[in-house]
Amino acid sequence: MAKEKGRKLIAQNKKARHDYLVIDTYEAGLVLTGTEVKSLRQGRASLVDGFVQLTDGEAWLHNVHVPEYSQGTWTNHSARRKRKLLLHRAEIDKLVSKSGDTGHTIVPLALYFKDGRAKVEIALAKGKKEYDKRQALREKQDRRETDRAIAAVKRRERGA
């Protein structure tokens, strides 16, 4: 059997990019049980309420929902258990020092398979205020409107 290559996305946390200003991103491995891997291979997971907590020099992923494996037996995992993240010591130390600042948190952005191994992209982030969210939304709408206007002009030029 050929080994998987590339990146296969399982779940993405789009709300995190809306609610937080992403400062730095890291790729971390996950310690999973067999039924969790099988459930993820079916493409089932949710990162919406997830966060990372650093305790005793280790990183733990909390509140990420990986539903029970449908063909699992009594050995099935619990859906919202905390999962250990695999990071280098230097990365953990950097996260510990930076996440201690006021308003900073660590959130998961994406869950995916990379060359057959489950990985999670985590971000050191700072919470946005309500007016920051509105400003970002306004900028996004303005960009979309200008792109549409440019596309309309190009269509008219091609048609003429």
Image (cartoon, rainbow, N blue to C red):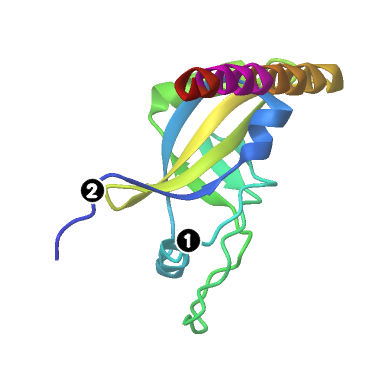
Image coordinates for residue 111, horizontal then vertical, percent: 48, 46
Which picture quadrant has residue 61?
A: top right
Checking the image for residue 5, the label placed there is: 2
Name the residue nearer the viewer: 139 or 17.
139
> What residue is at 48 percent from the left and 36 percent from the top?
121
Q: Which residue range is magenta in the image? A: 144-154
Q: Secondary structure at mark 2?
A: loop
Name the residue nearer the viewer: 91 or 122.
122
Gap between marks 1 and 2 measured at Cα? 17 Å
Image coordinates for residue 57, horizontal then vertical, percent: 51, 32
Residue linked to disc 1: 43
Instruction: Tell whether 138 sits left or right of 26.
Output: right
Q: Amino acid at mark 1?
A: Gly
The reply to whether residue 2 is in sight is yes
Image coordinates for residue 9, horizontal then vertical, percent: 43, 48
Q: Is residue 149 above or below residue 105?
A: above
Name the residue nearer the viewer: 10 or 136.
136
Q: Say which quadrant the N terminus sits in.
A: bottom left
Instruction: Tell whether 32 sits left or right of 79.
Output: left
Name the chief secondary structure element in magenta.
Answer: helix
Name the residue nearer the viewer: 128 or 160.
160
Q: State if disc 2 and disc 1 touch (CB < 8 Å).
A: no
Q: Residue furthest right?
A: 130
Tell me if residue 148 is in the magenta stretch.
Answer: yes
> What residue is at 41 percent from the left and 68 percent from the top?
38
> What residue is at 48 percent from the left and 80 percent from the top?
72
